[in-house]
Amino acid sequence: MRWPIHRKIGIGIVVIGLAPLVYATLRIYSHNWEPLAVRVRLAPGEFQSPVFKTDRNGRYLISLTFNPLPDLTRQQCMMGVPVFPRECDAITQTVDFDWQIVSKDGGVAQSGSYKVLSYSGAEATFGVFQGKRGKRWRALLRIRRDAGELNATWPKLVVHPGGEYWEGLPELYGYSLLWAKTVGIFGLLWVLAPMCFQALNRRKQRSYQLQIL
């Protein structure tokens, strides 16, 4: 059965409307945005994370996340966040360790000592390494000091891609959703309107034929 030209055009418009949304959705769900999120107790000793896999070539960030305490400023001082020097005068930093990211075969990709590079609330980013698509890694910590009450806030060691990979995705998804609604509805109307007119014409013709009879 051959489709009328208006139906082909309408379906083409719907496809054009949905294409950006499909692309944005694939961008969001085709990557692992948190390849590692593991609970860690910050007590003197050695810590080795489970193996995790990166699925893109590029920058990955290593962070510590904590459940927020009522006194967030005090918690940040213990985390070593360099934001309130005066408020931290009487509060000792309790997070202190050396870290390494090693490949599955034991090669060291990056290493360093804990130092807050950026932070947000009760999350502190302290390291960066270059991931490779399909490669497997471990995070190693050599913890020098007990984190004290911070251990009661469920600290987690987290690895995630750099912000440049995901910062524009919410806007891309929002605009593509708006485009899909606008253009997709127009395409559906283009398909359905002639069908409705044809149905009305057939109904009028039947009514006219009944009147003649």
Image: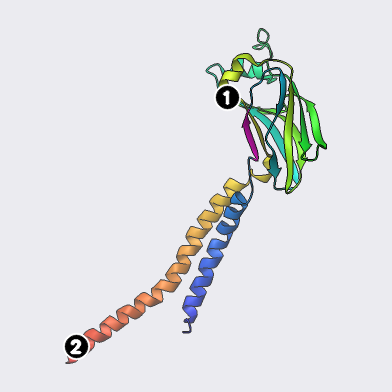
For this view, does 203 lie left or right of residue 182? left
| Residue 59, percent from left and from top | 74, 41
Which residue is at 48% across, 58% downward? 181
Give the overall secondary structure of the magenta segment. strand
In the rendered view, tell whether residue 43 sits above or below residue 104. above
Q: Residues within 10 Å of mark 1 (few under 14, many from 20)?
A: some
The residue that disc 2 covers is 210
Place residue 112 in its image quadrant: top right
Per the rendered image, the range of residues in magenta is: 35-39
Quadrant of the frame with the C terminus = bottom left
The residue that disc 1 covers is 154
**Could you tell me if the residues under marks 1 and 2 are in contact, i.e. CB atoms within 8 Å?**
no
In the rendered view, tell whether residue 133 sits above or below residue 8. above
Closest to the camera, between mark 1 and mark 2, is: 1
The amino acid beneath tag 1 is: Trp
Q: Secondary structure at mark 1?
A: loop
